[in-house]
Image (cartoon, rainbow, N blue to C red):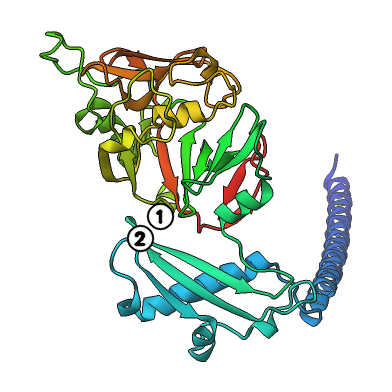
Amino acid sequence: MNDQEKKVVKEIDEDEINREVEDINEEIVDDTNTNKDFIKKILKFLVIFIIVMVVFMLILIIPSLLIPRTYKYSDIEDMLINATKKYYSDHSDLLPVDVGSTSQVDYATLVDEDYFKTLDEYEIDGKICNNAYITVEKTYTGYMYIPFLDCGADYSTTSFSNMVTNSNQVVTNGDGLYYELKSGNYIFRGENVNNYVKMGDYLWRIVKITSQGNLLLISADKIGYSTSWDDRFNSDKNYSSGYNDYSKSRIKEKVVDFYNNGIKSARNKMKPIITSKYKTYLVPFTLCVGRKDSNSEIKNNSDECKVRLDNQMIGLITVSDYVTASIDPGCKTITSKECQNYNYLAVGYEFWTLTGAASDSYSVYFSQRNGNIEAKSAASYANIRPTILLNGKVLYKSGKGTEKNPYKIR
């Protein structure tokens, strides 16, 4: 190829390259324009979406702003409690000092000092309440705030104990709630009674409502592991058979530890059986720890109450309270085999009572697996079902008292 031909080929190649470069540039420009159009579409979609969402939120919010909120009675009671807590945080010198003592603040005081709005600003199903007051009671672990809301014939705050007695018809035979005229106590008796209470993770059962309106509860199931009642050396027996004196027993140490520290969980961590919230609702009570004869036909704790242990926060059930729960007419003495019949406290495993036998210094009554009461050495083993006393002034939350739908308190 001569020089002239080489020159022509070179010029052709350069023209071809220039055309390809121009084509590439045109494609880049087209792609850029396409991307810009796509971005514009995305931005337009986002703007429309945001506008639609704002309109939707306004549709939801505006009616709620225009329509007055309807409150429940429990809402007002909770707001009264919160307002009272703020009031006493600013007036701590007015709080009750001694355990069991109370102080009261009127609704008008809360309104005057701007802790609460007037009641006519709170519509409750079209009704307006008239008055209110809040009582503060000093407990062992803090303060319990008890509101009372007066809405005339429509509603008034009812304590938990009153709710239980009002919702359970008092009966004179069969399963149910009995009224004991001499003591003034309401007692659950029979096999199928709706007396379950849920507090935290644990179920309890109402044994009775005292004349003061407090509720004696027993754990619905055993807590902890099977244990001896006492295992000290007994000089009367010349053996480590223990003593049936509850005030000095190992089992007292055990249940007090349950109350203070809880029990070990499956992961070996301490789990409270009564949380701090519910401890505030408990009342210290007297345990009747006297010993009882196995042939006694007395079921009113008069024998047990000859010896008392005051100011206890946790205990066990007396043998008299256990057999009183039976409605079998053949349950005449505390060791009658009929006492296991028609008795919700008979649960199919052995557990200790609070009561020692009067016949010696080392035997204690316990419920057998079949529910029959017998006495055995304190050093023997059985399960624990603690008892506590719940302040009846606490407020009811929900439930029917059944095992599947137990009572709950606020």
The x, y position of residue 108, in whole percent, is: 53, 86
Residue at the location (46% across, 42% down)?
A: 216
Determine which residue is flagged by label 2: 142
What secondary structure is found at the residue carrying circle 1?
Answer: loop
Determine which residue is flagged by label 1: 280
Residue at the location (27% across, 21% down)?
A: 358
How many other residues sit within 10 Å of disc 2, few (<14), some (14-19) or many (≥20)?
A: few
The x, y position of residue 71, in whole percent, is: 71, 71
User: Which quarter of the figure has residue 255?
Assistant: top left
Left or right for 300, reference 380: right
Q: Label 1 sits on what residue type? A: Thr
Left or right for 405, reference 12: left
What secondary structure is found at the residue carrying circle 2?
Answer: loop
Residue at the location (45% across, 20% down)?
A: 333
Residue at the location (59% across, 69% down)?
A: 77
Q: Nearer the viewer, residue 284 or 293?
A: 293
Rounded to the nearest angstrom, the CA distance separating label 2 from label 1 is 6 Å
Q: Nearer the viewer, residue 396 or 273?
A: 396
The x, y position of residue 144, in whole percent, is: 43, 62
Placement of the N terminus among the 4 image quadrants: top right
Left or right for 385, reference 209: left
Verify CB contact (< 8 Å) between mark 2 and mark 1: yes
